[in-house]
Image (cartoon, rainbow, N blue to C red):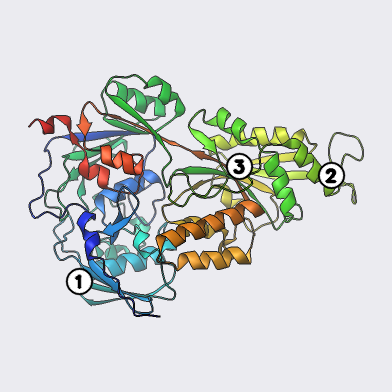
Amino acid sequence: MAVLVLCAMALGLTGCGSGDPEPARAHQGESFRIGVAERPDSLNPFTAADRVSEEFFLLVYDPLWRLNATGEPVNCLVEDWSMSSDQLTWTIRLRRDVTFSNGTPLTSRDVKFSYEELDRYDTVYADYFEGITAITCPDDYTVVISTSFVKGDMLYAPVPILPRSIWSDYSSAGYDTFDNEQMIGSGPFTRLLADTGPQEESWTFQARENYFGGSPQVGEVRFIYYATEANAGRALSIGDVDAAVGLSDVQLTTLEGVPGVQIIQTYLPGSQIWALAFNTRDSVFSDTSLRQMVDYCVDRDRILSMSSGTSGMAGSVWASPGTDYFHQVYAPRSFNQETSRSVLYSKGYSDVDQDGYLEFVGSYEDLVLRLYTSTQDDWSSTAATVLIEDLGELGVQVTWNTTDGDVTNVCGPKDDWDMCLLSMRGNTDPVIAGMPFRTADRGLTGWSNSTYDQTFAQMQTSMDRAAVVGLAGQLQQLVYDESPVLILGYYSDIQALRTDRWEGFDEVLAAAGGLFGIGSVDAYMAIRPVESEAS
C-alpha cells in the first residue's frame, strides 16, 4: 500500500463556525424560543438517551469533528489531523484557542478522558469507540488514537468533549450521580440558569461571544416544554414561541395558513423508524419464508393512516429516508394476504379441525404467535391491532402482551416471544445504524448472516463515503431479503417556525431539511432576527 497521510486543514473552514478573527456579535436580548413536547431525560451525557438532550449537548459541547448541515464532517476542536500509512493511528492536533465556559483551557487530556470514560460507562456513544485500542496525549494539544482496524467512521462520532477537571470528581461515586445542571462545555452556547420558575419547564442557552468559531447571531436559545403537541403548536400560532418541533399531523392543518408561520415536514437522519422484530431462534420464525409471510400480511398503509395520518411513509429498510445512504429495495413485497395464505399452506399449516384456526398438520398444534409491545410507543398499539386482525383473517392466532418499559427488555435472547413491535432511530452514520444486525450484536432477533458480517466489515473500514453508501445499500437489501426485522414505517419530523420574525436559516433548511434534530449546530449559529437586516 502506498504511504497514506491525510490532512484535514481545509475542513476547518466551516467547522464550529466561521473562525473569523472578529466574529459578529450576538444580538443581545434576542431570544429564539422553541416549543418542545418532550422533556430531556437527562442533562448528563453519561445517562441521556433522548433527542432533546442530544440537542442541548449540541449547543453546549464541542466534538472533535462536527457535522455540517449537509451531513459532512468538518473540523471543530481539531486544527488538523493525519493518519499513519496503515491507517491504524490517528494523530490529531487540537486548536489552542478553546476554553470551556468556566474559563478553563481545553486540552488533549479532556479528549482522552471523554472518549475513555463515555466508552467505559457504556453510554449511547459507546458504539462509536469500537476498534479504538489506545489514546495517548504526547502534549497538551496532541491526541494519538490507535485502532485495531481501519476506522472509517471516526469523523462521524458526535462525542461531546467534557471538562476532565469537573467530571473526574465523580469517577468514584459514579457519573450518574452528577446532575450537571450548569453544563460546562466549550460549545457556542452556555446554560443560563433562571433565577425563578421551575427549571424543568424551560432550558435557556446563552450565546458565547468569545466562542472560537464565531459568536452565534442570536442572543439565546430557549426551549420551552409543552405537555402536548397541540399546545406547542398553539403557542407558535399566537407568538409565544418562535418555533415548535415534534408536532403531529394535526398541526399540519391547524398551522396551515397562519400568517408568518412556515411548516417543515421532513425525514431527518435520526427520525423514528417503526419495526416488527422476529425471534429467529424460535421454531416458527427460524424459517425465512414464514417471516416473509407476516410481511405480506402487514398492511403498512393502514397502520400509518390510523396512527400518524399524513406524517409518515411505509417502510422497507433500516436506514432513514433522511440519510444519504437510504436504499430503495429491489422487488418490494406488498400487502397480499393470499400470498401469506399460500406460504402457510406450503409450510404445512391448515385448518385441520375446521375451528377457524390453523394447525400444523404434522402435530395438530395450533399456530399461536406471541407478540409484545411497549406502552412507551403510542403507535404500537394501533399496529398490533391491525396485525392481529389481518393475521386472524388467515387463521393465525396472536397473543398480545404489553410492557411499561423498553420492549427489548422482554424481547431478547430468550425463547418465550415470537414478535415485538419497537421503535428505532436512524443515524447519520451507517456503521452505527447497521450494527444491530451483525452476528456480534444479534441479541434481539438471533439472526446471523456471514455475508452481512463481511460486507459490514468492509463498510466499517472504508474511508470512501461513496463506497460506504454502496455497501450500506447492500446491507439494507440483505436484511430486507431475509427479514429478521420488518421496517413498517418512517415517522416524519414536523417542525414549524416564525419566518416573520427570524431569518438566516434558508440554506440550512435546503441542506438539512429542518432546524431541530439535524445533528448540526449550523442553524443555531445562522439564525437571526429579521430586523437585523435593516439595522
Of the residues tagged 1 and 2, which is closer to the observer?
A: 2
Q: Nearer the viewer, residue 315 or 283?
A: 315
Which residue is under mark 2? 345
Helix, strand or loop at mark 1: loop
Image side of residue 30 versus residue 469, left or right: left
Please state which of residues 156 and 136 is positioned toward the viewer in this rendering.
156
Residue 412 position within the rendered picture, expressed as x and y whole percent measured from the top left: 61, 55
- The residue tagged 3 is 373
Residue 126: % across, % down: 42, 62
Task: Say whether residue 111 is visible.
Answer: yes
> Is 487 situated above or below 264?
below
The amino acid type found where label 3 is placed reads: Thr
Amino acid, disc 2 = Tyr
Mark 1–mark 3 Cα distance, whole angstroms, equals 49 Å
- The x, y position of residue 458, in whole percent, is 50, 67
Q: Nearer the viewer, mark 3 or mark 2?
A: 2
